[in-house]
Amino acid sequence: MTAGQVKKTGFNRKHLIVMALGNIIGSGIFLASGIVISLTGPAAVIAYMIGGLVMLLEVMFIAEMSIVNPAPGAFRVHASEVFGPGVGFVNGWMFWCSGVLGMASEVTAAAIFSAFWFPSIPLWLFCLVYSIVMTFINFMDVRGLSRFEAWLASIKIIALIVFILFGFLAVIGVLHIGLPGAKVGFSSLNTFLPGGFKGLWASMLMVLFSFTGTGIIGMAVADMNNPAKDLPPAIYVISAATTVLYSASILFIVLLVPWNTLSASESPFVVIMQNSGIPLAGTILNVIVLTASLSGLNSSMYSASRMLASLSRDRQGPKKFLAVNKNGVPVYALTLTSGILALTAVLSYILPERVFIILTGASGFTAMVNWLTISVTHIFYRKKTLKERPEKLQFKVPGYPWTSILAIVLIAAVLLTSFLYPEQISSLLTGIILIAVLMVIYIALRKLKVLE
């Protein structure tokens, strides 16, 4: 049986919202937010609002094009329709690489959170164990996967809401949480942008990494029964929920702890709750942030393996990746994806102190290149659709083409200024080399007539 022969599994609006929130909310907010705040100070709140705007634009572009053509592979297919198979090839394999790097970031974060209890156990061992466990879970059918993800996503959404509530009660003086002796309240915002705009833009790649799980929306459209009806309202719920939860959480973090005390080695959420005086609060929240990372790993594994199957369907990947099991899971695509993920254990062994920043930066860079491609594709796809099949244009992104141009400008600015954070330079070089390698591979395969 091939992936193309499997009937739709019945994803509806609720399933999509759950899967998307599960894929988006992960280590990007629970761990990488410490890096963002250390670079930006209290202005991190503004950074996450900007990130939410860019995410909203991207998911609207994906929704419009996916309703016109709800093909497996989504934006990769749309880019191919507009710019030819070469762009689709690079875009698809970039998405897969970004997905694997994102999974690696999540499994590394899970290992870091686990070290909270077991500091003597090396990170690489946690990475290996979590990779194996989540691979077995992904061999379930998508409905079972959705139910599992619903449980994981609910835990972290509730955790963010509870944290925001606790933060509010602390600011008004009802609770006493935060670091001992630290200023609590709006007086801590006196130095709002300590690093200037340089610090703000240096953090934006990490900020946008926190929103990059939106790619699963394009992957899941092919499994939806009625995308024209369910997709538009779902993307608004996803965008609004994510942006509000992120921005409010960051606001209370900077109100409760000095911004220059945070780092990539610990979650600011755990730091605050550990010093709250509430029994076991730090331990409980660490369980939750660990769950959040595993949830992000779980849904990223779903979307990355489906992209491999989509590439194979269009003869841009080995035909073997089309094979599925009785649950409709592309077994070889999933096996390769999780196998590459296991290499994270090796990197964690070699560079335990820097592995999270390297993987997060590389994943964010490759995801931003894909977002840039989606934004450019949208401009031409709208024109193409109006000319060839205007009746399919059931959902239109407002403000066209200026919304597409705004997204292009913002993403390009992030990519061009991300080198301002020196720790990201190696990640940027990795991303650039990856794009170049994929282009060379495509040209070579075309000359060898392996690709049509």
Image (cartoon, rainbow, N blue to C red):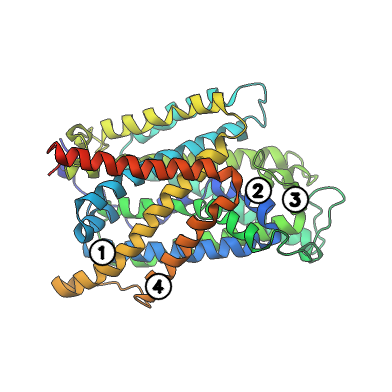
Mark with earlier residue (1, 4):
1
Q: Is residue 107 above or below residue 124?
A: below
Residue 211 visible, this orientation: yes
Q: Mark 4 highlights which residue? A: 403
Q: Are marks 1 and 4 in contact (CB under 8 Å)?
A: no
Give the CA separation, mark 3 to mark 1: 45 Å
Nearest the camera: 66 or 402? Answer: 402
Amino acid on which the number 1 mark rests in the picture = Ile
Q: Specify few, some or many for label 2: CA neighbours under 10 Å numbering under 14, 14-19, or 20 or more.
A: many
CB contact under 8 Å: marks 4 and 2:
no
Q: Which mark is residue 67?
A: 1
Nearest-to-viewer mark from 2 and 3: 3
Q: Secondary structure at mark 4?
A: helix
Name the amino acid, label 3: Asn
Mark 2 vs 3, N-terminal side:
2
Q: Residue at x 68, y 47 (%)?
A: 268
* Secondary element at tag 3: helix
Marks 4 and 3, Cα distance to the nearest angstrom? Answer: 35 Å
> Mark 2 touching mark 3, by CB under 8 A?
no
Q: Position of residue 404 (x, y in %)?
A: 37, 69
Residue drawn at x 27%, y 41% is: 440
Question: In the rendered structure, which amino acid carries the disc numbered 2?
Answer: Gly
User: Compared with residue 223, is residue 245 higher up or lower down, i.e. above or below?
Assistant: below
Residue 66 in the figure: left or right of residue 256: left
**Label 2 belongs to which residue?**
34
Q: Which residue is mark 3?
A: 260
Nearest to N terminus: mark 3 or mark 1:
1
